[in-house]
Each structure stands twice: as structure tokens, then as C-alpha cells.
Amino acid sequence: IQGAKSCDLLILGAGPGGYTAAIRAGQAGLKVIIVEGAKAGGTCLNVGCIPSKALIHAAEVFHKTKGLEGGQNVLGISLATPSIDLAKTIGWKDGIVGRLNKGVEGLMLKAGVERVTGWGGMLDGKTCEVMQEEGPILIHGEHVVLATGSEPVALASLPFGGKILSSTEALALEEVPKQLVVVGGGYIGLELGTAFAKLGSHVTVVESADHLLPHYDRDITKVVEASLKELGVEILTGAKAKQLTQDGACLLVDLSDGREVSLPSDKVLVTVGRKPRLDGWGASNLYLTMRDGFIAIDDQCRTSMTDVFAIGDVTGEPMLAHRAIAQGELVADIVAGKMRRFDTVCIPAICFTDPEVVSAGLSPQEAIAAGFETVVGQFPFAANGRAMATEAEIGFVRVVARKDNQVVLGIQAVGRGVAELSAAFGLALEMGARLDDIAGTIHAHPTQGEALQEAAFAAMGQPLHM
Ligand code: FAD
């Protein structure tokens, strides 16, 4: 043992949850040590949210440019044949990740946080042993935050390696695969599947549920499915991926009608979910209560052990970066002596497909299941001037409200660029907006955001531009 360090707050894992807790606690004057075995920023920054959106953007630019080839398009713009050098694209993506890595490191430094590089293992609820080249060091924390995140779920018959990829390897491919099979039609599979289809792969999505994006309702997923088909993506729902053929060239899939098909594939991307990272950091040395396979926490992110908190993906669904960030910020405040609870009306979820999907709060079906009598208003982007002027006419915004007092329960949208509307949706729900609050807010023209106001008008029975 090299020596021992001690601090007010010891954080294991510097993903969005961990580094946010570190920065906030450092700003509050606490002595903070954060232990991270890889680069700062976790899954989100290194192999998740940011690199995937960079690849999606590059694919979109390439696809749009391809659409302008030869001048036979509605915009009347013509271009010579565009090409893509995916290795260069990946280099650009890595550059963004690198800049953000440095940014996070810089913010932690500025807040006075000590960063210990190495893989940590908890020996008990206050002590972490970190392996380093010179030997292990011990860190004692008065308070501990477990923020070890999550990892991709593997299929026993299709273990990662060779041509079977997780999202991490898919984000580092330097050549566009000719035939890509995506196993799992959730948001990660569809985001990456869309990107590769736009880059020129022939993509087939294999999903065991009866529709893609099983967490969203059919009105929304129908729009995404139609666009995927238009892009040339083949969709097999109610289908189960089995294993590769003997020669490894094809993936065998059981279809819903009992037939078996063999799908030619250069690469198979398995995106069947993510699981909490519970191995390799001494979880078994702690007395943690578990819930549904995740570390159980209360509304202050406290675990079953005194002064041991847990945040982010390791604590449950929704496994999203903004939930981890919100929990990190909350825990830092609590350790610094503030009284806070994780009390949110909604955690918006976005799927960055084309069109994008946003869901904040309850869908019409969920609102009814929760016992509310509801009114629902919907406005199509086909009737929105900005959407028409930017080739974004697919999709709609939908508002769900209580019938009795018109308080908004949920807002969903599917359409090009709707991810940027999610802040307005979340704000409306957090502020307890009623339909007339949204309808009475002057929305700047021409914007896609006007569709939210129009959907509120529609839910009030007073549609305007419809
Ligand atoms: P993580 O980001 O997983 O960070 C955990 C950190 O702990 C890692 O850096 C790890 O190295 C470190 N660690 C683990 N064990 C140890 C140890 N023993 N010692 C030291 N360090 C350790 N979410 C969104 O909100 N929006 C999106 O658009 C989005 N897109 C995604 C796309 C993809 C392809 C993927 C895979 C995920 C995406 N996510 C998205 C999910 C998002 O990345 C996670 O929800 C988020 O990163 C969780 O943050 P976290 O801090 O809980 O854990």
C-alpha cells in the first residue's frame, strides 16, 4: 500500500453522474476525490450520447448531400457525387470527445476536485482501494457516491467479438459495413441503424416485440417505422435472432410466423439493453439492498448503507445521462448540508432517429391507466410553416391534459429536430402548466415550437391553424 488519502466525498466513477457530483461538491468547498479508471465523462461522453450524435449528424449531412446528387431534387440544387471517408469522420468525432474530456477534467480541477486515475474497489462503506502502476492506494471518504454506470447486455448465442458489435465498437468502425443487422429495435439500435443506413449500409432491424421502440406508443412509432422503411431499412418485428451460421456469414433469425431466415451480415450490432455495472468494484463487500437488479436508493439517492449514495445508471431506469446529472447535483448539495429530494415531474426521453422522438410525462394511454380523465390535442408538422420550409413535415406534437382542470400531464412529439423542443415540454410539466398557459404563451413565428401551442389549442377544443 502506497499511502492513504482522505476526503469529505469519495466518488467512484466519473461519468455524467459522478463528475457532476464532484464539480458541485467541490464548488461547495468540500474535499472531493473522484476515482475513474478510464477517461472522464463515462459512457455518455466517450461511447454514448455525444459520439452517437456526432455520427448521426455526419450521416445526415452525407445523406442530404447524396439526395442533392444530379440535381433531380425539389430544392433545385445539384451536386457532383459525394463520398465519405468514415475513418476521417470517426477522427472528427474523436476530436469532439477529446475536447469534452478535457473540458470535464478542467471543470473538476477548477472546482478543486482531486482526480485519482485507476480502477477502484470498495473494501467497505468508507474505503476504496485503487490499483495504480506503483501499487495500490487507499482512499477514505466520509461520504461515498457509487456512480459506476452501466454496460451493454450481451446475448449468450451472440457474444461480443469479431463481427458481433456492441454500440461501443459500432461507434469506432472505420468502414461502412455493406450489410448491417441490428438486433434490438430500442433507441440505441435505431439511432445507430439510421446513421449506418444513411452512410450506405443495407440495414435490417430484428426486434422481438411486435413494434420498434417498444417503450413508445404506436402513433409515434408508426411514423418512425415508415421513415426507416423509406430509407431502405428492413424491419423484422416479432423476430428472434439466434446465432450465426456455421460459416459465420449470416445471422439466423426466427420469424413470428415460425419460419427461419438467414440474413447475410458483415456486422451484427447487438443493442438489446444495458445493465448496471456491479462487478469488479467490490459491491459484494458492501451491504447494499438491490431492487430489480439495480442498487436501491431513496429519494435522496441514499443506499441502504449510512452515508453511501448511488446515482445514475447503476440505480435504475431510465438509464439516461440527464437523470444521472440531476442526481449527481442533488447528492452534492445533500452532502454539503442542503435539504433536497429527487422530486421531478418528468425525465424527458429522446430518440435521435429521423424523425426524432421526444416524450415528457404521460402518454394518453399512460394517463388513462393512471386514472385520469383526459383531453388530448395534436398538431401535425405538415401544417407548420417552418416545418414546410425546412423539409420537416413528418410527425406531430401531442399534448395530454387532465379534463377537469386542464393541467398538462404529458407532451410527446415526433418530427425532424423535435429534440430541441424537449426543454419547453419539460418546463411546462415542471411548472404545472395548464393548457391555457401554453396556448396563451406567444410562440415566435415561424418555428416548429408553434406546433406545441397549436396542440394546446386543439386540446382546448379551439384549434387555430387546423
Ligand atoms: P457512466 O456514464 O456509465 O459512467 C460510469 C463511469 O464509472 C465510467 O467512466 C467507468 O469507467 C467508471 N467506473 C466504473 N467502475 C469503476 C471502477 N471500479 N473504478 C473506477 N471507475 C469506474 N443518454 C441520454 O440521456 N441521451 C442520449 O442521447 C444517450 N445516448 C446514448 C447512446 C449510446 C450508444 C449509449 C451506450 C448510451 C446513451 N445514453 C444516452 C445513456 C447514457 O450514456 C448513460 O445514461 C449515462 O452515461 C449514465 O451515466 P453514469 O454516470 O450513471 O454512468
Image (cartoon, grey):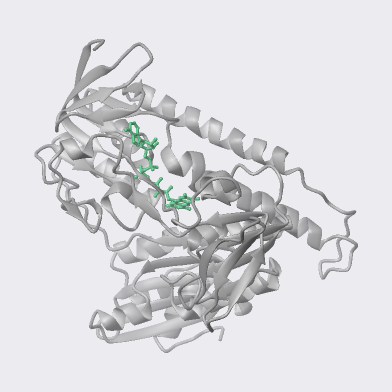
Quadrant observed for ligand 1 in the rendered image: top left
- The residue that appears at 44% across and 56% down in the rendered structure is 156
Is residue 455 toward the left or the right of residue 119 in the image? Answer: right
Q: Classify residue 87 by image quadrant.
A: top right
Is residue 38 toward the left or the right of residue 280 in the image? Answer: right
Q: In this orientation, which residue lies closer to the viewer: 252 or 447?
A: 252
In the image, is residue 329 above or below residue 56?
Answer: above
Is residue 11 toward the left or the right of residue 396 in the image? Answer: left
- The residue that appears at 56% across and 83% down in the rendered structure is 465
Where the N terminus falls, by quadrant?
top left
Query: Where in the figure is residue 175, as x and y percent of width and height?
Result: 71, 45
| Identity of the residue furthest to the bottom in this view | 461
| Identity of the residue furthest to the front in this view | 246
Query: Where in the figure is residue 197, as x and y percent of width and height?
Result: 68, 60
Where the C terminus falls, by quadrant?
bottom right
| Identity of the residue furthest to the left in this view | 306
Q: In this orientation, which residue lies closer to the viewer: 401 or 264?
A: 264
Query: Where in the figure is residue 202, as x and y percent of width and height?
Result: 70, 63
- The residue that appears at 34% across and 73% down in the rendered structure is 362
Q: In this orientation, which residue lies closer to the viewer: 187 or 75?
A: 187
- The residue that appears at 55% across and 68% down in the rendered structure is 206
Camera sees residue 354: no
Q: In this orientation, which residue lies closer to the viewer: 438 or 139?
A: 139
Query: Where in the figure is residue 433, as x and y percent of width and height?
Result: 32, 69
Camera sees residue 18: yes
In the image, is residue 173 above or below residue 273?
Answer: above
Is residue 142 toward the left or the right of residue 382 in the image? Answer: left
